[in-house]
Image (cartoon, rainbow, N blue to C red):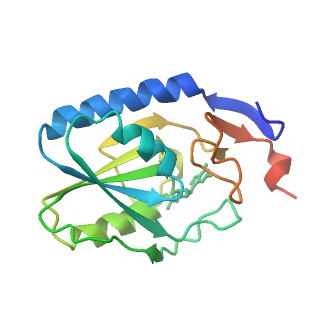
């Protein structure tokens, strides 16, 4: 474990088992239908790359980037599209892949925005869910782990662009981000 971490919340093995489970459920639900998997950069990149390899249905990729917390750990509530999709999603089966649903503001905005583009279907898959932090109602169709209200890093999630490469999900020591 890295010295900045207080503890490991979800181990590498637990993540791998959950990704397989989610991939099987998604494969069953979509069958032979092609899924356009939309990863939300940058946090969902690692989860998405593992998840798509556990999905048996045909898959196409796209990515979006939206404004996030910057260097702070609190959401501003303002969502800005930094990178939009490369392709039209009209008539496609879209699966948004996100790292964590926290206040729900980001996904709420994304769902509204993508729904207005007339996909054939639109579902959400989030690795983590912090239901106690919700400000707007968002329910993912596929959720990896419900976690308490703690700031976590690893497996794609960062603090100031650090720790995304950790193979596990960890809680940082408070003094790393509270100065
Ligand atoms: P929401 O709009 O639901 O409040 O926030 C979603 C985004 O906030 C996530 O995509 C992620 O970038 C960031 N976020 C929320 N909670 C955490 C956390 O515990 N750790 C990290 N690293 N980012 C988080």
How far across and down, in percent of the image, does residue 46 sit? 50, 45
**Residue drawn at x 32%, y 50% as measured from the top left:** 124
**Residue drawn at x 17%, y 64% as measured from the top left:** 119
How far across and down, in percent of the image, does residue 89 sit? 21, 67
How far across and down, in percent of the image, does residue 172 sit? 75, 42
Q: What is the quadrant of residue 90 in the picture?
A: bottom left
The picture quadrant for ligand 1 comes to bottom right
**Residue drawn at x 45%, y 64% as measured from the top left:** 106
Q: What is the quadrant of residue 27 in the picture?
A: top left
Q: Answer whether residue 101 is visible to the viewer in this image.
A: no
The one of 27 and 125 positioned closer to us in this rendering: 27
Viewed as shown, does residue 41 lie left or right of 117? right
**Residue drawn at x 61%, y 35% as measured from the top left:** 167
Viewed as shown, does residue 52 lie left or right of 94? right
Picture quarter with the C terminus: bottom right
Picture quarter with the N terminus: top right
Q: Is residue 54 above or below residue 43?
A: above
């Amino acid at each position: 474990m890295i010295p900045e971490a207080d503890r490991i919340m979800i181990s590498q093995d637990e993540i791998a088992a959950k990704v397989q489970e989610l991939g099987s459920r998604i494969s069953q639900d979509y069958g032979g239908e092609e899924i356009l998997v939309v990863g939300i950069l940058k946090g969902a990149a690692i989860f998405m790359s593992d998840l798509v390899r556990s999905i048996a249905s045909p898959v196409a990729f796209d990515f979006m980037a939206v404004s996030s917390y910057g260097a702070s750990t609190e959401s501003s509530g303002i969502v800005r599209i930094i990178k939009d999709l490369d392709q039209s999603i009209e008539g496609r089966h879209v699966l948004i892949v996100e790292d964590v649903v926290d206040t729900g503001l980001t996904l709420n905005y994304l769902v509204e925005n993508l729904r207005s583009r007339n996909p054939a279907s639109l579902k959400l898959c989030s690795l983590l869910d912090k239901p106690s932090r919700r400000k707007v109602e968002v329910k993912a169709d596929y959720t990896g782990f419900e976690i308490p209200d703690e700031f976590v890093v690893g497996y794609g999630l960062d603090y100031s662009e650090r720790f995304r490469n950790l193979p596990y999900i960890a809680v940082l020591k408070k003094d790393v981000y509270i100065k």
